[in-house]
Every structure is written in structure tokens, then in C-alpha cells.
Amino acid sequence: MSQTEIDITMKSLSVLYVEDDLHILDAIQKPLGRHVKELYVATNGAEGLHIFSLYAPDIVITDIKMPVMDGLKMAREIKAQSPGTPIIIVSAFNEAEYFTSALDIRIDQYLFKPINMDTLIETVERCARHIALESEVKRKNAELATHIKILSGYKYAIDVSSLVCKLDRFGSYTDVNQARSDLLGYTKEELSGKRYTILCHTLFKPEEKLAIEDAIDKNLLYKGVVRMQTKSGGSLYCDTTLVPIFDENGQCCEIISIERDITEIIERAYTDTLTNYPNRKAMRRDIENAPLPMLIVINVDDFGLVNDFYGNAIGDAALRTIIDTLNAYVKRILPEAHVYKFSGDEFAVLLLDRSQCGGIREFVQGIMNELNSVHCAPDGTDLLLSFSAGYTTQKEHALSKANIALRHAKNNKTTIACYENLSDSEQDYKRNIIWTKTIRMATENDWITPWFQPIIDVKTKSVIQYECLMRIVNPDGTISMPDEFLPIAYKTRIYYTMSKMMIKKSCEYFADKPFDFSVNTTMREIANRDMVDFIKRTVTETGTARRFVLELLESDKCDLNVEEHVAEIRNLGCKVAIDDFGMGYSNFDRLLRLNVNYLKIDGTIISKIDTDRNSLMIAETIAAFAKKLGIRTIAEYVHNDMVGNVVNRFSIDFAQGFLYGKPEPEIPIK
């Protein structure tokens, strides 16, 4: 302790001084009293003992030889009451018997008269230091006891609510709590020394098992849902946290696993609420671990009519009857097969290993024959139902392929269709499904990004603006081009989301750049009030209204009236361009009504003006017409010097194409 800390401690203490010599008391009282909080005095041991019982001073200083009761007897009484109270003996006697008696009663200090005040103060300070240390130890012990009590409460709470086990630093079991033993069926002795992952279920994904092993080997925290196998052969799902414990040297000394049984929650997510059969999510889970799967998807033809004519109650009862019939037949023929209930009126059968099925087509046909025997719901309502089925023996995108086969069966009025036997057109349908999924993932994961292609002034060859072109940047770094996904995107409402992402990202990119920039939109989008409001809000917030060019697809045949919406956007200072002009839906009256700033002559025309006279004449006519209207023209697809030279010969204002620059993810800033 520092001197300052000692002084502070001294000022918090009370001292009892017992001395029958009044001259000594007078000499000591003032100087000692200045160092302590309270100083009590007594002239004999009996009086001192009485004062101690009243005020319990922190330190006692006493003479030995005194009337009524001597100092040693008083000290013995005080030590009996308060063993920790420091007692200082001050005496003129140095006989051995006094030292022996003082030792017997554990006197803390022994000073000789005449008293040296500095020595006395130093002795009291040593006692004060001892008292402070004792107080700190008591405080720490009290804190420790509190922490231990709290930790004991935590341990109890965890033990009664969670599954807990201890592993050594290599990931082998050393201990398990009772809750875990009761649930999994394995005792501490049965698991001791075995690797933690030994209880991972055989259907637990291998890569997830490797992730656990990797976390253990590298002493990393692991969190995840682990599917475990019980001693009785069942399985359960545990929300698991593996925590490495490190010693004072930073070395992992053990690993604690805390697990919570969430089987009921998981199974609820994997179960159809109407029938209590596994659902689509369960099928996807199971097929991942299937070595040689075959998936059959079955649909009730025109089942909506049942609900319309008989009501939902009878419809639901019919669905339960159908799946019970399906399950009974499948389990009778192939007990290893699994039956699922999808949403609505669809069912599925999964063979994990199709090699166990003697004849696949015969098995599917048998299912259909059995289902066709279902004529009534449990309440006796007679229903005449028919079914269609599609199946595939391919594991990758199995559900999509089985659905394609099902669609083929319905479209061709057949009962059963096999994906592997479909025509190329059906394969195209499959690709559309896959691209639709990719597009949806791209919007959900922010993979949509603009690339920028320069547009140059034909005379000066300087860049005057950029066109923002949509790309999908895939997780593996590959780039998907618009001609791959836009034709499919146009057919879905996802395109509106993609278009908004393009507009927002393009405006944000050019917010601090000195160039005009154009973004493609369709007439149908501009007819949408929400899209117009979004454009107006975005260009205003980013401060890009006067540099934003709304590029409308002229080939987008749309009879909707968009003039008012375009005018709203123009009123903010935005410009308007017509893209692909001359491609097939050219409407000169619309140009006048939309009051456009630019005409972009279609690339299929420009790309051939050096070799095709008709293309040259069309381009010249459009350029001349636009010039009379005061509309500037942009030649697209200027891909080589020959085309560029022809463009330079007549009154086209601007040009765009690989000759002047390809689309890039960033623009050069000079």
C-alpha cells in the first residue's frame, strides 16, 4: 500500500489506548489522535474492556502493569471476543514471562517505554495495513462467495434446462450431465474417451460433421444444429454450442458442449399441418442424403372443384384419405420409401435407393392404380378423382425435374411422365425454372449490379454519357449477361425489383460524377405508378435528376398511356431516350407526345450499315427525321471501324459500341 492509502486507512480507524500513567496519556493523546478517526482512553484494564465492549475499536494499545485489571488479562479477554483485533503492548518490563504471556494470547506488537512517538505511529500504521489487507481479503472472499453462488445457480439452470457434456482438448468425452444421459441413453462411462462426433446421425451432412471436427481441432467456437443418434436408434436435433476453455497460458484445456433439444421445433417445420406427414422441406432434406434417389410427384387433377362443390372440410378429409392410401400402398411394396404431403393437392414419394425397386415404371403405375381406387372421403361423400404423376431418377434439381414431368403429363393428358424421356422443349422449361430461381436469389442477395458503356460524341470522340447495363455477379465470380436472364425476368414481377435495384445503384454511382447516364426501363414499368414514384424519389434523393436519362424500350409494344408519367419525370429535369428505335414498333406520333431527347437507332440496323444498303437507308432516314424534330440520335452497336466510318458520314450525333468501349464495372475517372 502507498503512504497515501495508509493515511486514508488510518483516518478510518478507531484506537483504544489503556494507560494508568496520566502524564503518558496526556503526551500521547493529541499526536496519536491526529492520525486516527477516533481515540478512546482508559486508565486500567477493566475500564478498557468496558470501552471495547461498547465501541469495538479497531486497534488496542495497552500497558501491562495497571490497577484493577492488568493489560495482559484485558488483552486475553479482548482476543477471546475478537481474535482479529490487533493489540499493541507498551511496557517498561522486558521479563521473559511477559513475552511468553504476550505470545500465548497472540499479541501483535510489543513496544518498550519510554515511548517514541514516531515508532508508535509506525507500529499503528503496520496494524492499519494489516487491517486493510484483512478487510480486502474479506471483501474478495465475499465477492467470490457471491460469484460461486451465482455460478452454482447458472450451473443448476443449465443442468436442468440443457444437455451438457465436457470434452478434453482433443474432442473426446470426459463427462456428461444427467439430462443428456437420460435423453440420448448413453452414460458417462459409455462415452468416456470417445470422439464427440460419434453420436452424429448417419443422415447428418458430412460437411457439417467436418465443420465440428475442424472447430474442435482448431479450438474454435462452434454453433449449429446437430442431428444426433440415440442409443435406441432414434434421432433428435440439438441446438449446439461448443466452447473451448483456455488456461492462463492461452492453451485449450477442455471443451464444454451445451445443447438444447429442438427436435419438436424441427419436426414441426418438416411436417404438413393438415396430414401430419413430412412436407416439402423434409423431402429436400432427405433427398440430399439419398444415394440413388427416385422422386415421384403426384397431383390431384382439378382438385379445386372438390373444394368449390363440397367445401374445404370435405376437401381436407379427401386429402387425408389420399395420403393414407398412398402411404399404405408404398409401405406395403417398398417399406424403405418415404411419402410426403406438399402444399395444396400435391404428394410425393421418394426412394432413397431406386435399386431396391424392381421396375420403376411398374411401381409408379401401381401407385396410380391404387389412388384411382379412392372414391370417397371419410364422411361417405363419393368423389371421382383422377391423378397425374411425374418422376425423375436424377438427384440434382430432382423436384424441379419431377415437376416438369408432371406438367408434361397434364399438358399431354397422360397419367405418368418421366423427366428423362421428355423432349428438348421440356428441357428448355427446366432451364427457365432454374433461371427463375437464380433471378430470385440475385435480387434477394443483392447480386444485381450495373456495368457502364460509354456513349461518345461522333465529332469530338469524347464521352458524353454512359448507359447502365444490368449484370448478375454470381457468388463464384462469374457474370450472367442480360440475354441469359432478361427474357425470363420480363415474364415475372421480379423484373420490377431488378429494375429498381438498377435505378437506385446507378443513381448512387453517378451521384458524384459529372456524366449523364441512362437506365433501361420498359413502357409497362413506366405505366406503373409505384415505379414512377420510385424513380422520382431516387433521382431527387441522389441529386442526379438533371443527368438521369430514362431509356424506354421502343420495341416494348404497350398500349398503356404513359405520356403523363414520362412528363412527371421530365419535369424534374430528367431526359428521355427511346431505345432500339426502328426495330418493329416505331411510332412517330408517340415520339412527339413523349417529347424525347434521344433516339437510339437499333443495333441490328447499325451493325450492318457498311454492308447492307437497306440498313443504311433506314439509318439515314431515321437520322434525318430526328434532326427535323430536334431530337438527337445515338447509333448503337458500332463494333468496328467500317461501321464507325459510315456513322461519321451522316448526321448521327452520338455513337455507342465496342469500337469505343465495352461495358465495365467501373468508369475511368480522369
Image: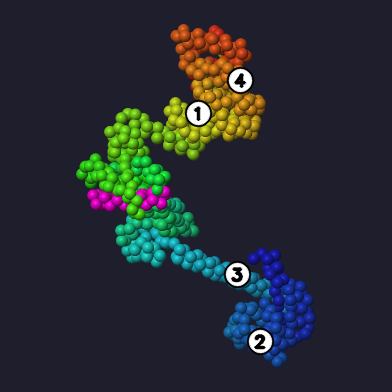
For residue 483, which quarter of the picture? top left
**As displayed, is residue 403 above or below residue 54?**
above
Helix, strand or loop for the magenta stretch, by majority: helix
Q: Which region is colored magenta?
A: 311-339
Residue 564 magenta-highlighted: no
The secondary element bearing badge 4 is classed as helix
Res. 589 in view: yes
Amino acid tagged 1? Met
- Give the amino acid type for the residue marked by disc 4 in the picture: Arg
Q: Amino acid at mark 3?
A: Arg
| Image x and y of residue 478, in percent | 43, 31
Q: Which residue is mark 4?
A: 593
The mark closer to the camera, 2 or 1, is: 1
Q: Is residue 89 above or below residue 368?
A: below
Residue receiving disc 3: 139
User: Who comes first in sequence, dot 4 or dot 2?
Assistant: 2
Q: Position of residue 58 (x, y in %)?
A: 67, 77
Pick whichever, 432 or 131, lies toward us. Answer: 432
From this viewpoint, which residue is outermost toward the left?
A: 358
Do callouts 2 and 3 mark residues in contact (Cβ within 8 Å)? no
